[in-house]
Image: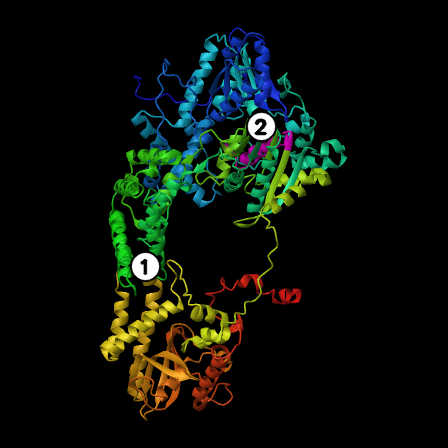
């Protein structure tokens, strides 16, 4: 093209209804309707065959304009069903659905056209261009992360497409007089838009590119001109195109006015009264269009009426396609979706207009049960020869569940709506690698990569998984550092280092090391490193298959784009940015699944039909889906520009359901709960039930079959509370002073831990627990005693050193280490005060000891023992949480202080002798004054405080220990689960004891036996 600028396609100034072919005075439109209940593709194929007559070659002369590529497949299958083998098919051309990211067919976008039209800008290039413009024109002092800029850019791209599809001249936006009452954020967004749109068009013009919707408009306009200027001898039939795009409407009108042109529309309600039809006209309450208008777009006929108005024909000019038949069920379907003010007429309707005898409904407990019910129904339908079944649902998770359930019978069926790329195996691995960078190689991120099915999927996979399991076990618990080096340190510091595991891990760390050096690098470098690591980790498998090829295509498109707007990669926002970049990519399965079963989304289901249609996910927010608000244009401005409102999507969803209800057999399903919680039934389902009342049959038998599918052959009753009874030899185990609480409150947990020898398996990347904090504090205090001789100043220094560790996990540094350090400084200050004011001396700290009670070895480790000025011993126990309550102590629990005192008096602790007369809990938690640190005395300090006397405290603790040893270690008392649940504070073995099965059901289970 020689011109420096591409001509803009502006809104036409003339009336759409005046477009007529030359030399024609009274044109007759050729527009047909296929009523609900007919298979659009089948009746169209029948009509084309009848029109062709006996000449089989005449069929190939027809040109069919269809809405999308999937419609071409469905129409092809319809011709195959209707005609004998060997037929030449008509030429089918896809207009292309922008919502499915489809392009115009080659007939509509010819290579040898005499009109030079600039190519469309790539989707990712446009996203980057808009993200840059959004960032350049953001409000003053506002900050936008790359992910937020991309999100706003994607929304802006959708808005630009809407404006171009509706042929809204951008100068119209500039001429809007903004209402002063409009909220401030809307005024700010509008101001940004006025700056961004001219800059966007200037950038496209400089590149000699066009937006996809604008280019589509030019191509359709060129087609409309060719149809008007040239005599087309071949019949042209537009089938099932219901989009309200003005450029498409012009083409449809031109086809309808051609002598050999026909337009076939699906589901226009010709039986709807003129009054109700006229009520669907969109009118505003004021001349400027800023007023609120009635909620008309929710009606399933609204978009069809709008399309007819754009084409310029009346409903009376539409005929029923000769091969189609009007179905009685259409009247009831029309009533279901009538406007609210018309529903008052339901009471006077005859029974035939208030029933759907071909439909049933079912309500499942949850989405898992719903998927199973659907799978059972599909499996039953396949028993009928040639019967076609389709599931229509906007819930992609439900679609995946159903496909999984069908595989139990070897039925392979894929969701035609596709799976988001980031949910496929290649996508999840790429996301796991990004997450590893963002989390600074947390253990959970490393394990997610190592356990991924694509990682080392070759012959060495089994050996790889053996090492991964060993790594999983070795790295359980709270992390104490970040980065690959922290994992290496943990493996080296293990009690029993695994040399083979260390060798394997060093190779893995070397493989992942390049990712650790990507922080603050340009985004292009990050993508290159991710690509190389993913290729090495999977030996290239990540780029294979349909999902891998889509990932490779998208990766190449992103890599070749201008990523300067993303700046340098920051670990904290890397995952969000990566998701925004790849969120639009969808992997649609190739054809080749079961020939009589299909799963469709709402868009893919249009023009599809089957003998049995299952409409699922009928919950509010799913069907209909509630569109997200436009962040750029206020609703009032959208109304002024006559853009579709958020309700338009509801109306389209209603039409999708109305079309599905016309099938020969229909099943409607919903689930009371999904993974997000309780659900609300769809407004459509509620209307169906309200109109049909008791006549809509519930398929309870199907629910029973689904429940029986996985029901065991014999019923397994709930487990009883476990009461293990080991023999006398097995009971003879040594005890720790801290074991008595568990032994008395939850004997079963003691049995699992000490007798069965089952250690607690901590979580991966576990949150800091009291045990972890206690271990950290005791480790510091032990070094303070052994290396610093309890010098007060050195403990404060160790607390400060704890905060200075750069390699520590950021969460620990920010949340827990300051608290622990504050507690340790309190310990130092309190120790100094007691030394100065009371003459105390630290006698021993972190020293082990062992004593025999009734012939059983009881071991313990003293946190600290001080010696008073008069020579008595003060037994101190550090607590990172709150100390035991008086109720707990009086009930015979929390024996640790008393038993340590007994060890001290029995000379069982090295370096300590004397009478243990004082007992203290030093808590490092916040006190009542909101400071860190407090001292609690477990013995009586005043009359009536209900605490044991100081002189009797050791004897009391020993007596309680003797009873416990007599009952469970030397006796035959069963190790009852949760004997005293009010004092059983830990649930490490709850799953082993099957707590949820019998807890709360003890009486029921015992009565039944």
Q: Callout 1 environment at 10 Å: few (<14), some (14 to 19), or many (20+)?
A: some
Q: Position of residue 349 (x, y in %)?
A: 75, 33
Q: Secondary structure at mark 2?
A: loop
Residue under numbered circle 1: 810
Looking at the image, residue 595 lies above or below residue 529: above
Nearer-the-camera pick, 683 or 359: 359
Magenta stretch, overall SS: helix
Q: Which residues are magenta?
A: 643-665
Residue 636 lies in magenta, yes or no?
Answer: no
Q: Quadrant of residue 669?
A: top right
Q: Please tell me how crowded label 2 is: few (under 14), some (14-19), or many (20+) other residues with Cα within 10 Å.
A: many
- Dot 2 corresponds to which residue? 609
Quadrant holding the C terminus: bottom right
State yes or no: residue 652 in magenta: yes
- Residue 281 visible in the displayed image: no
x and y percentages locating residue 392 in the rendered image: 56, 35
Report if residue 853 is visible in the image. Answer: yes
């Amino acid at each position: 093209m020689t011109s420096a600028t591409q001509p803009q396609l502006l809104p036409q100034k003339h009336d759409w209804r005046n477009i007529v072919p030359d030399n024609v005075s009274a044109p007759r439109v050729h527009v047909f309707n296929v009523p609900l209940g007919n298979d659009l593709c089948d009746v169209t194929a029948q009509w084309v065959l009848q029109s062709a007559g006996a000449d089989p070659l005449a069929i190939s002369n027809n040109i069919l304009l269809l809405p999308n590529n999937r419609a071409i497949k469905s129409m092809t299958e319809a011709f195959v069903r209707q005609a004998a083998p060997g037929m030449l098919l008509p030429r089918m051309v896809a207009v292309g659905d922008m919502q499915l990211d489809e392009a115009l067919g080659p007939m509509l976008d010819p290579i040898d056209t005499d009109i030079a039209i600039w190519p469309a800008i790539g989707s990712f290039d446009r996203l980057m261009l808009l993200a840059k413009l959004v960032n350049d024109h953001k409000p003053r002092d506002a900050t936008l992360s790359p992910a937020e800029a991309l999100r706003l850019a994607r929304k802006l791209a959708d808005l630009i497409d809407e404006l171009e599809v509706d042929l809204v001249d951008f100068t119209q936006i500039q001429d809007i007089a903004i209402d002063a009452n409009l909220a401030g954020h809307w005024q700010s967004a509008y101001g940004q838009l006025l700056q961004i749109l001219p800059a966007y068009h200037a950038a496209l013009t400089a590149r000699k590119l066009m937006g996809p919707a604008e280019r589509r408009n030019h191509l359709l306009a060129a087609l409309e001109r060719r149809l008007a200027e040239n005599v087309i001898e071949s019949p042209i039939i537009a089938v099932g195109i219901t989009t309200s795009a003005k450029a498409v409407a012009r083409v449809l009108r031109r086809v309808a006015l051609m002598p050999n042109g026909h337009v076939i529309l699906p589901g226009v309600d010709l039986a709807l009264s003129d009054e109700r039809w006229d009520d669907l006209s969109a009118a505003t309450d004021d001349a400027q269009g800023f007023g609120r208008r009635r909620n008309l777009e929710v009606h399933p006929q609204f978009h069809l009426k709008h399309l007819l108005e754009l084409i310029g024909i009346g409903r009376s000019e539409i005929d029923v396609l000769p091969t189609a038949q009007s179905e009685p069920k259409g009247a009831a379907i029309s009533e279901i979706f009538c406007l609210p003010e018309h529903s008052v007429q339901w009471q006077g309707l005859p029974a035939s207009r208030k029933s759907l005898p071909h439909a049933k409904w079912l309500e499942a407990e949850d989405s898992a049960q719903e998927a199973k019910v659907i799978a059972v129904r599909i499996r039953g339908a396949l028993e009928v020869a040639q019967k076609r079944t389709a599931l229509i649902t906007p819930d992609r998770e439900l679609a995946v569940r159903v496909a999984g359930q069908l595989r139990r019978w070897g039925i392979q069926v894929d969701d035609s709506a596709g799976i988001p790329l980031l949910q496929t195996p290649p996508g999840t691995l790429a996301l796991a690698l990004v997450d590893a960078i963002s989390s600074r190689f947390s253990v959970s991120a490393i394990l997610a990569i190592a356990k991924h099915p694509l990682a080392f999927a070759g012959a060495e996979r089994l050996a790889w998984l053996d090492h991964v399991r060993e790594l999983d076990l070795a790295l359980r618990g709270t992390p104490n550092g970040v980065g690959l080096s922290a994992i290496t340190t943990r493996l080296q510091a293990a009690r029993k280092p695994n040399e083979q595991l260390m060798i394997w891990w060093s190779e893995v760390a070397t493989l992942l090391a390049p990712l650790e050096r990507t922080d603050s690098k340009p985004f292009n470098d990050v993508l290159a490193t991710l690509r190389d690591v993913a290729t090495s980790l999977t030996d290239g498998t990540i780029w294979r298959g349909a999902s891998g090829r889509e990932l490779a295509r998208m990766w190449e498109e992103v890599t070749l784009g201008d990523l300067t707007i993303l700046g340098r990669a920051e670990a904290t926002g890397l995952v969000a940015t990566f998701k925004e970049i790849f969120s639009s990519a969808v992997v649609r399965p190739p054809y080749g699944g079961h020939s009589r079963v299909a799963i469709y989304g709402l868009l893919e289901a249009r023009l599809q039909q089957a003998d049995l249609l299952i409409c699922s996910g009928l919950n509010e927010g799913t069907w209909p889906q509630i569109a997200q608000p436009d962040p750029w244009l206020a609703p009032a401005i959208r109304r002024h520009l006559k853009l579709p409102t958020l309700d338009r999507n509801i109306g389209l969803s209603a039409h999708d359901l109305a079309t599905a209800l016309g099938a020969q057999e229909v099943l409607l399903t919903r689930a009371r709960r999904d993974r997000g919680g309780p659900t609300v039934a769809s407004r459509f389902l509620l209307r169906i039930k309200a109109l049909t009342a008791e006549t809509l049959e519930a398929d309870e038998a199907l629910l029973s079959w689904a429940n029986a599918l996985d029901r065991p052959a014999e019923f397994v009753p709930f487990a009883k509370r476990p009461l293990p009874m080991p023999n006398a030899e097995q009971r003879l185990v040594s005890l720790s002073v801290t074991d008595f609480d568990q032994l008395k409150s939850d004997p079963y947990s003691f049995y699992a831990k000490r007798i069965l020898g089952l250690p607690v398996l901590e979580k991966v990347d576990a949150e800091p627990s009291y045990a972890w904090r206690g271990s950290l504090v005791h480790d510091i205090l032990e070094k303070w005693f052994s290396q610093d001789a309890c010098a007060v100043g050195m403990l404060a220094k160790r607390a400060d050193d704890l905060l200075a560790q750069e390699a520590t996990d950021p969460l620990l540094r920010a949340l827990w280490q300051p608290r622990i350090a504050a507690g340790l400084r309190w310990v130092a200050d309190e120790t100094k005060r007691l030394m100065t004011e009371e003459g105390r001396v630290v006698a021993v700290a972190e020293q082990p000891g062992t004593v025999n009670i009734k012939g059983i070895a009881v071991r313990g480790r003293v946190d600290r023992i001080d010696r008073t000025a008069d020579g008595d011993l003060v037994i101190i126990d550090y607590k990172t949480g709150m100390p035991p309550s008086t109720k707990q102590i009086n009930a015979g629990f929390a024996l640790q202080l008393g038993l340590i005192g007994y060890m001290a008096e029995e000379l069982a602790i090295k370096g300590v002798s004397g009478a243990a007369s004082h007992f203290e809990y030093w808590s490092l938690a916040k006190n009542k004054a909101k400071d860190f640190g407090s001292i609690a005395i477990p013995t009586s300090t005043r009359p009536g405080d209900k605490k044991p006397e100081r002189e009797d405290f050791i004897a009391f603790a020993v007596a309680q220990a003797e009873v416990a040893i007599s009952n469970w270690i030397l006796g035959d008392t069963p190790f009852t689960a949760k004997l005293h649940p009010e004092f059983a504070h830990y649930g490490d073995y709850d799953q082993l004891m099957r707590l949820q099965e019998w807890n709360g059901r003890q009486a029921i289970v015992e009565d039944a036996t």
